[in-house]
Image: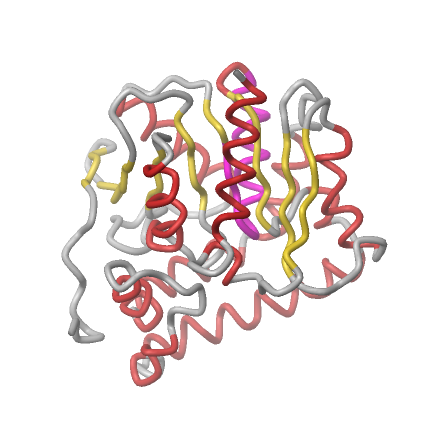
Amino acid sequence: MIRTGAAPAPRGDFVDLGGRRLHVVRAGPTGAAPLVLLEAGSFGFSADWGVVQEKLAALGVRSLAYDRAGMGLSDPGPAPRDGLAIVSDLEKLLETLGEYGPFVLVGHSMAGLHVHLFAGRNPAKVAGLVLVDAVTPTVAADVAVRHGAAQYVRLSRAAAWAASKGLLRAISPLGDQIGLTAEVAPHKRWAFGHPAHNRAAADEVIQWDATVAQATEAGPLDPKWPVVVVTAGPAPMYLKPRAIQADPAWKAGKGYVENVRKANHASLVGRRHADVVVKAIDFVRKAAA
């Protein structure tokens, strides 16, 4: 049993970006292509993708998940922690690893903005995208979503403060809302109560408006890229935010939308529902080939 205050032993490797390190977890057979890049949502990190990576590896698919700067086991990065800083780190990480694509980009939640920005900056390196209950630039422009984002910024600040006082460690057993395996769940529970992780995560959320603007300026996705949108929960697809969320798949030459009614935003990538995400990744991988 890992104590809530003690960092678990790393599952992967550390990659030096020139004086600071990012924690990286790679899975699947060496050299298999295309590489699947997994971007966790806000407050998330490599552990969030533990189940998905295990299932992809079983299919012979190679994947990479990592902890963004300051989160999980990665060293802090320079401020501000907006989308441009995050994507720049990812570009440096891939270059350091000698990975040049094309990549299947998978973004959960707020990371939909990060993969959109990466795609806009690196179009020749994109094989396709999977958006997992993700925020897109058009979703973020919706009035209701903008109001919710403002509330979320305040909640993120509160979470960082609570973690700094040690208040979240007392409830860290509740930190895995995804439904991870016994190997990975302790990493998620540890990060849930960790002050530095929460502070870095809040710093990303605070930059919401800047990240949305940067992703929007990157322009629309190339319709040649296959895109799958996976959503969670019983909300009908005709509701405005949900319909906007599905739009990238409808505009793609190849793609589809799948709603998992019994999943929630977190459990969509856990043991109960990860097969749907893996199926989407496999579709995009094959469509791109």
> What's the coloring here?
secondary structure
Left or right of 83 on screen, residue 95: left
Q: Residue at x 44, y 64 (%)?
A: 178
Q: Is residue 186 magenta?
A: no
Q: Residue at x 27, y 41 (%)?
A: 24
Q: Nearer the viewer, residue 187 or 254?
A: 254
Left or right of 147 on screen, residue 118: left
Where does the N terminus fall, quadrant-wise? bottom left
Q: Position of residue 3 (x, y in %)?
A: 17, 75
Q: Nearer the viewer, residue 272 or 150?
A: 272
Quadrant in which residue 53 is drawn? top left
Quadrant in which residue 237 is drawn? bottom right
Left or right of 215 on screen, residue 108: left
Question: What span is colored magenta in the figure?
Answer: 105-123
Q: Nearer the viewer, residue 114 or 32?
A: 32
Quadrant in which residue 4 is drawn? bottom left
**In the rendered image of this protein, does residue 165 appear above or below residue 252?**
below
Chief SS of the magenta region: helix
Q: How many marks?
A: 0
Left or right of 238 on screen, residue 106: left
Q: Position of residue 79 (x, y in %)?
A: 41, 47
**Residue reaching furthest to the front:** 59
Q: Residue at x 32, y 78 (%)?
A: 173
Q: Position of residue 272 (x, y in %)?
A: 47, 61
Q: Is residue 119 magenta?
A: yes
Q: Position of residue 137 (x, y in %)?
A: 69, 42
